[in-house]
Image (cartoon, rainbow, N blue to C red):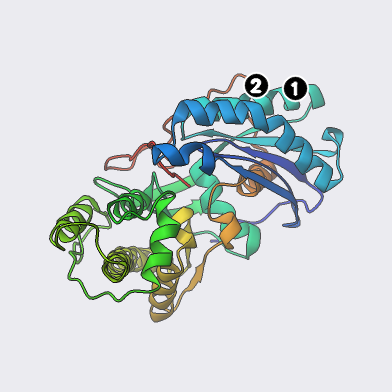
């Protein structure tokens, strides 16, 4: 049975996100109004290193977060006294950055005498679809990003059952590493998608785990195959055409793998619950080819596919604020001594390896 929605439309929550390399603050209401959503990217700070350096990220959060919060509150036209709660990412992520956002939220909550809500970053992604659409529980969630690749049944706020996860690398990491092999720069995922738009999927690349009975993923072998392919193209850098074709071939392989794994998970959802929706969340959900492939899959299985708008796929404060709205509606809040966590699985009882955040995009 769908969980009843008890969200008051008058609730207003400030959400802070600092788990990786975006410093973000947003103000969201129970009416699904995003009154402000300010995101400051640190791409230029990390580009020389080809990935996120945790120490640099944490320092940037310290320097920028106060100004980002002030801007969000000004855009919303509110003061701290107008808020019903303050939500912040408490993990998983680069723990130095997580601590910056969480400690700031604690200070605001204490000063304004408002509840503090410690949000799991992954739950923020999973619930973001409910900010933009009427998605009822239970639903199937494909969480795909630089640091995570999981299939979960979302049975309610705070209630998730993992069906499968990656046994090695996250799909977003595979995008980034493939982009690096092709000399496409950083961040790799968007650069690879742009290159693939001008190419053809003419190279035969493996589809790891395709056809397996479980719902797990694997992308390490696909990365290795791409490296061997690039090395076999001949001496020197690959041509623009070769880069585009390799990118398109890689993207097609990823699409096939995600569709195959999701098909098995959809069968479980339909068998156990008789229906539901497929929610695709996380930074990789911004990839148009991935979205299209999964939309086709959902249509073939007679269910809706919901993905947040592009601005809500990558890390942002609005998804954290909305998770705060959802938790507040259930009377859930946290003490001021709640700890930041580098690891925090949505389903701690699930079998399989947990892929932890890395020094790279983990949107």
| Distance between the alpha carbons at the discs numbered 1 and 2 | 8 Å
Q: Residue 24 appears at what percent x and percent y?
A: 64, 41
Q: Residue furthest front?
A: 236
For label 1, count other residues whose C-alpha is less than 10 Å away and answer few (under 14), some (14-19) or many (20+): some
Q: Can residue 341 be seen in this view?
A: no
Left or right: 162 as drawn, with respect to 39? left
In the image, residue 295 lies at what x, y percent? Answer: 44, 74
Q: At which x and y percent is residue 21? A: 52, 39
Q: Is residue 275 above or below residue 327?
A: below
In this rendering, would 353 be left or right of 340? left
- Locate residue 25: give its quadrant: top right
Determine which quarter of the picture holds residue 206: bottom left
- Which secondary structure lies at badge 1? helix
Compare residues 170 and 273 and report the one nearer the observer. Answer: 170
Q: How many labels does the image show?
A: 2
Residue denoted by label 2: 336
Q: How crowded is mark 2: few (under 14 residues within 10 Å), some or many (20 or more)?
A: some
* Residue bearing mark 1: 110
Q: What is the number of the mark on residue 358?
A: none
Q: Are marks 1 and 2 in contact (CB under 8 Å)?
A: yes
The residue most toward the top is 337
Q: Circle 2 sits in a helix, a strand or a loop, which is it? A: loop
Looking at the image, residue 20 sits to the left or right of residue 332; the answer is left
In the foreground, 282 or 117: 282
Place residue 263 in its image quadrant. bottom left
- Residue that appears at 32% across and 63% down: 258
Q: Earlier in the sequence, mark 1 or mark 2?
A: 1
Rendered residue at 15%/58% (across/down)? 235
Q: Can residue 99 be seen in this view?
A: yes
- Residue at point 44% right, 44% down? 362
């Amino acid at each position: 049975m769908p969980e009843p929605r008890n969200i008051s439309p008058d609730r207003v929550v400030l959400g802070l996100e600092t788990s990786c390399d975006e410093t973000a603050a947003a103000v969201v209401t129970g009416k699904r109004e995003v009154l402000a959503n300010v995101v400051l990217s640190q791409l230029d700070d990390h580009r020389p290193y080809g990935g996120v350096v945790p120490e640099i990220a944490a320092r940037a959060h310290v320097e920028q977060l106060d100004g980002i919060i002030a801007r969000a509150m000004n855009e919303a036209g509110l003061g701290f006294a107008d808020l019903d709660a303050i939500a912040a990412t408490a993990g998983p992520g680069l723990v130095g950055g997580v601590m910056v956002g969480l400690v700031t939220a604690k200070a605001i909550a204490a000063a304004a005498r408002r509840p503090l809500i410690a949000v799991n970053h992954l739950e923020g992604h999973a619930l973001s679809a409910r900010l933009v659409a009427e998605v009822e529980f239970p639903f199937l969630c494909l969480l795909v990003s630089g640091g995570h690749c999981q299939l979960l049944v979302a049975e309610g706020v705070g209630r998730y059952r993992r069906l499968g996860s990656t046994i090695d690398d996250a799909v977003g990491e595979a995008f980034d590493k493939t982009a690096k092999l092709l000399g496409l720069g950083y961040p790799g995922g968007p650069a690879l998608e742009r290159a693939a738009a001008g190419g053809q999927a003419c190279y035969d690349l493996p589809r790891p785990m395709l056809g397996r009975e479980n719902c797990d993923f694997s992308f390490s072998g696909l990365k290795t195959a791409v490296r061997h392919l690039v090395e076999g193209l001949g001496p020197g850098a690959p041509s623009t055409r070769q880069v585009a074709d390799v990118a398109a071939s890689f993207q097609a392989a990823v699409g096939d793998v995600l569709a195959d794994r999701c098909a098995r998970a959809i069968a479980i959802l339909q068998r156990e619950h008789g229906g539901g929706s497929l929610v695709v969340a996380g930074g990789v959900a911004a990839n148009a080819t991935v979205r299209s492939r999964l939309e086709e899959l959902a249509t073939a299985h007679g269910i809706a596919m919901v993905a947040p708008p592009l601005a809500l796929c990558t890390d942002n404060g609005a998804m954290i604020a909305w998770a705060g709205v959802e938790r507040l509606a259930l009377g859930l809040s946290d003490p001021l001594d709640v700890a930041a966590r580098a690891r925090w699985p949505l389903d701690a009882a699930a079998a399989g390896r947990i892929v932890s955040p890395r020094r790279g995009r983990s949107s």
